[in-house]
Amino acid sequence: MSQSPLRVLLVVRDHSDHITQAGLELVESLRRESRFELIGIVGTDDVQPANPAELVVVLGGDGTILRTCRQLGPQQRPILGVNLGRLGFLADLSPAEFLDRLAELAERRFQVIHHLMFSCLLRRTDGPTETHVGLNEVAVLSAGSLQMLRVDLSIDGERVTTFRGDGLIVATPVGSTAHSLAAGGPILKQDLQAFVITPISPHTLTNRPLVDRADCVYTLAVPEAVPGVMLVIDGQIRRPLSAGDCVEVRRAAETFQLARLSHHSYYGTLYRKLGWGGQTRHGN
């Protein structure tokens, strides 16, 4: 019995020349193949959670995937990234590789891996709250204040320590190769159920990254905050913080669904993207 066409939504980062050209090639190939049904071509801001797609193909980079994931909200779909950005830990297929493996996609020979997402609750000292769902990290940053920042960390209501420095990051395993890695945090394998807390330029040298369970609630309080201190979510959502505000980070109800084709290797991706092979040696 033949399968119905795979319903695909194509999400494009922008309308720059190289994105447009790559998008046209993908669209033409999908439309030529009867085993696909292309249900739409949209920008990241136009992704609708209630859509019939079985697979969301994102043309851009990891940042485009982050935006798409947030736009889908509680109605996550499997996402396959086609990389036209830089490192591309999530979007690690080139356009040529995507086109070469259309048959596998049409036959639904891909694996969907569920990854931890977070819910970030911002509690203002004067009462209002707001909640955002994300995939990579929550960062409390000294940013434009140009001053050392104090962040009090509690886990499940238990006071852990006070960090003083340029800020503090709470990252998922997917986010451990982003801002947290740049700040000196460890790389967590993407399917772990844990968060990593990474201080940024800590004033106390004994402050080191900390890894704990995903089912904990992480509270970051800023008892003293001058203008310029900022909450940043996934590098894309920014909210100013005031003295007395606090941020709560916990596991989100939804999970990020990453579509992977066969023969994908997480460590192989790290090897390529991070240059772990080093430089080629010539002679003795």
Image (cartoon, rainbow, N blue to C red):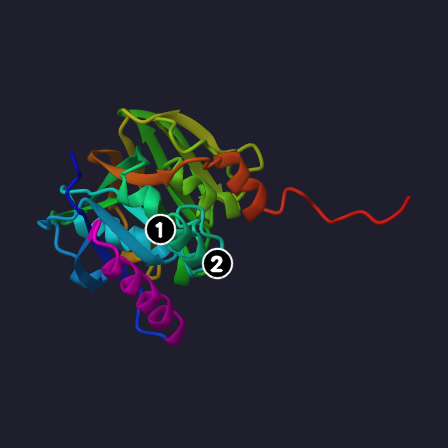
- Residue at 31% across, 40% down: 258
- Residue at 10% across, 51% down: 51
Q: In this image, 116 relative to 149: left or right?
A: left
Q: Which stretch did the figure color magenta?
A: 17-36
Circle 1 residue: 81
- Residue at 44% across, 49% down: 92
User: Residues at badges 1 and 2 in contact (C-beta under 8 Å)?
Assistant: no
Relative height, residue 17 to residue 250 (above, below) = below
Amino acid tagged 2: Arg
Whether 229 is among the magenta residues is no
> Which residue in the rendered view is the most extreme toward the front?
1
Q: In this image, 217 relative to 168: left or right?
A: left
State the image quarter where residue 10 is shown: bottom left
Q: Nearer the viewer, residue 82 or 43?
A: 82
Q: Residues within 10 Å of mark 2 (few under 14, many from 20)?
A: few
Which structural element holds mark 1? strand
Name the main secondary structure of what is drawn in magenta: helix
State the image quarter where residue 260 is shown: top left
Circle 2 residue: 86
Quadrant (top left/top right/bottom left/bottom right) for the N terminus:
top left
Quadrant (top left/top right/bottom left/bottom right) for the C terminus:
top right
Relative height, residue 203 to residue 16 (above, below) = above
